Amino acid sequence: MIASPVFELTGSCNLRDVGGISTVDGRRVRRGRLLRSGVLTRLTPDAVRQLQSLPVRAVCDLRRTEERERHPNPSFGAGVRQFEWDSAIGTSPIRDAGFVRSESVEAARAAMEAMYRRIPFVLQSRLAGAFTALAHARDGATIVHCSAGKDRTGVAIALILESLGVSRELVVADYVLTRQAVDLRRELFGDDATGAGLAANAEPFRALPGFALDAVLDARPEYILAALRAVEDRHGTVERYLLDELGLEPALLTDLRECLLEE
């Protein structure tokens, strides 16, 4: 059973608790320990206080430098560690020709799957950082987020859930919940026109053909499966990827299972 309730906080975007998901050995992910989200910039002071009460101990920001500068995170207090990374990449992959020049929905979806296959091998330090953030938080909550809370966050959360022993079926089901958790089209083209933190404005998305935009905003099972299968094609298993590609220590993975799982 999937139990990832959306946090109905003012200014939130695709913010939800991953807790409650079952593992193959019958345990569950603890509630209030692992949160996934899109952009946090618009959280109201009251919403921030509600998150602080969990309490939040770490925020893992997977966005590029220019995204963080344009839409900075709110302060969660001195006791909350912010994990972030400098990046020389200044443009969104949505500007790639594979999306802009797509001539069919199948081509646009194929471009999304190709992007997902790259994520585990171009964002290694950030993906490893999500595990480090969880280890830092220990008795509190970690928020892992990007802009929409779908692509980069989706891969990070999928890897974490796989490391905890969640079945592939439930990992995919959690990813697909973005479809119900947030209306990304409204976030992009609504009255505030912020681009949901995805762009300085919605113009890069307006340039896409309608079917390509649909493919970009969707959370299709095939997308996250493309990332996980790319990991397995190169490393055999997700765990070997975590150890060899991300450089995580076996003891850290064991510790996270003890901290994040309950009977």
Image: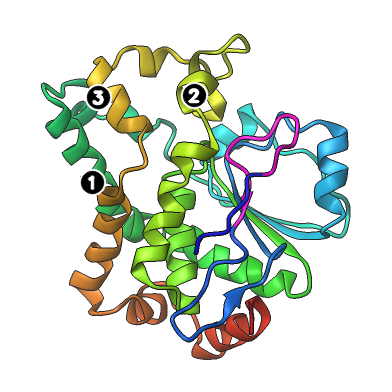
Among the two numbered marks 2 and 3 on one chain, the one whose residue lies closer to the N terminus:
2
For label 2, the residue is: 199
Quadrant in which residue 9 is drawn: top right
Query: Which image quarter holds the C terminus?
Result: bottom right
- What residue is shown at x 37% (from left), y 58% (from top)? 172
Kindly identify the amino acid type of the residue bearing the numbered disc 1.
Glu
| Region of the chain picked out in magenta, as a range | 7-17
Residue type at mark 3 is: Ala
Residue 140 higher or lower than 104, as above or below: below
Task: Kindly identify the residue that appears in the image at 47 percent across and 59 percent down.
Answer: 156
Tell me which colouring the rendered structure shows: rainbow
Q: What residue sits 60% from the left and 66% below the top?
A: 20
Q: How far across and how far down the image is residue 35, in percent?
A: 64, 55
Q: Position of residue 245 (x, y in %)?
A: 36, 73
Q: Residues within 10 Å of mark 2 (few under 14, many from 20)?
A: many
Magenta stretch: residue 15 in it? yes
Return the mark for residue 113. 1
**Residue at the top extreme?**
191
Q: Main secondary structure of the magenta part?
A: loop
Badge number at residue 212: 3
Task: Please give left or right for residue 182 compared with residue 103 in the image.
Answer: right
The disc, 1 or 2, on the residue closer to the chain's N-terminal end is 1
Of the numbered discs 3 and 1, the one sitting upstream in the chain is 1
Q: Is 172 on the left or on the right of 48, as rendered? A: left
Q: Is residue 209 left or right of residue 252?
A: left
The residue lying toward the viewer, choosing from 239 and 29, is 29
